Image (spheres, grey):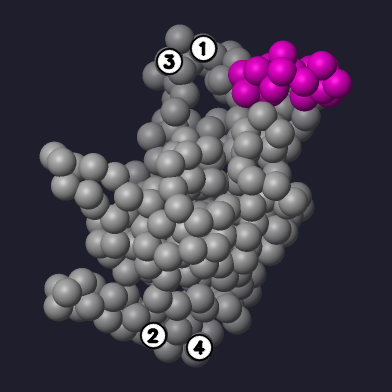
Amino acid sequence: MIEIKNLTVKYNDRNNEVTALNNINISIKKGDIYVFIGPSGCVKSTLLHVLSGIIKDYRGSVLLGNGEIDVRKQIIGLVQQNYGLLPWKTVYNNIILGAKIKCSQDKSRDIHEDELYAEKIMNELNIQHLKNRYPGEISGGQKQRAAIARALVLKPDILLMDEPFSALDAITRENLQNLFLNIWKKYKITTVFITHSVEEALYLGKHIIIMSSSPGTIIENVENPLFCMENVMENEKYYKIAGKIRSTLKRGMNNENQS
């Protein structure tokens, strides 16, 4: 479980103090998918940077299991919108890189097991045939599969996904959403997923966390009754819940404009 209490993040912008996140409180259950949705400018990605250990200067507490976030003790997988693949390494060498680094830090970890696991994950993501190619030689959807594989090979305690499908065309995005959900059903990795799409939130989120902007605060935590439901858009509840989420998002934006 991830326990976030009174999390506030501030930074300086031209000598002015800006509050990015304000008083965030949430418990994230092990093995669930939490989708954070909000308007542009609500600094949803800042939360991922705290959870990944990139941002260390904050107020409040962030606990993973029984201790604070520490990338030396915990394994955190991060999938970004821009893939983050090294152009001079092959797809396979990109995928196995994080595991190799972890093995150099933890002598009890077996790189041979990681290599076998990498082959398995590549097969499940249907990119085995691309292993010897370079990022510049493959499509955006294939790059994102490689980025997801790289995170999964780590066998992470938590998977962080920062709008990973937003730059893809509609068909590729839908295919990868389905693929990701199937992978999650198999491995049940605790996942924090950032999006600005109501449709994506309803499809992928077991819990949908609606945020306001400037500063980012949690407006509402929605338990999604449509999670993992087939043909979800044909369900009569779908448009009712989607409308409620949109109304809540607008309320958060209106509160900002009035402040």
| Callouts 3 and 2 close, C-beta under 8 Å | no
User: On screen, 27 above or below 235?
Assistant: above
The span shown in magenta is 96-114
What residue lies at 62% left-to-right and 60% top-to-bottom? 3
Q: Nearer the viewer, mark 2 or mark 1?
A: 2
From the viewer's perspective, is 166 left or right of 40? right
Q: Can you identify the residue that label 3 sits on? A: 87
Q: Secondary structure at mark 3?
A: loop
| Callouts 2 and 1 close, C-beta under 8 Å | no
What residue lies at 20% left-to-right and 78% top-to-bottom? 254
- The percent coordinates of residue 209 (x first, y second) are 47, 69
Q: Secondary structure at mark 1?
A: loop
Q: Residues within 10 Å of mark 4 (few under 14, many from 20)?
A: few
Residue type at mark 1? Answer: Lys
Q: Residues within 10 Å of mark 3 (few under 14, many from 20)?
A: few
In the picture, the disc for residue 89 is 1
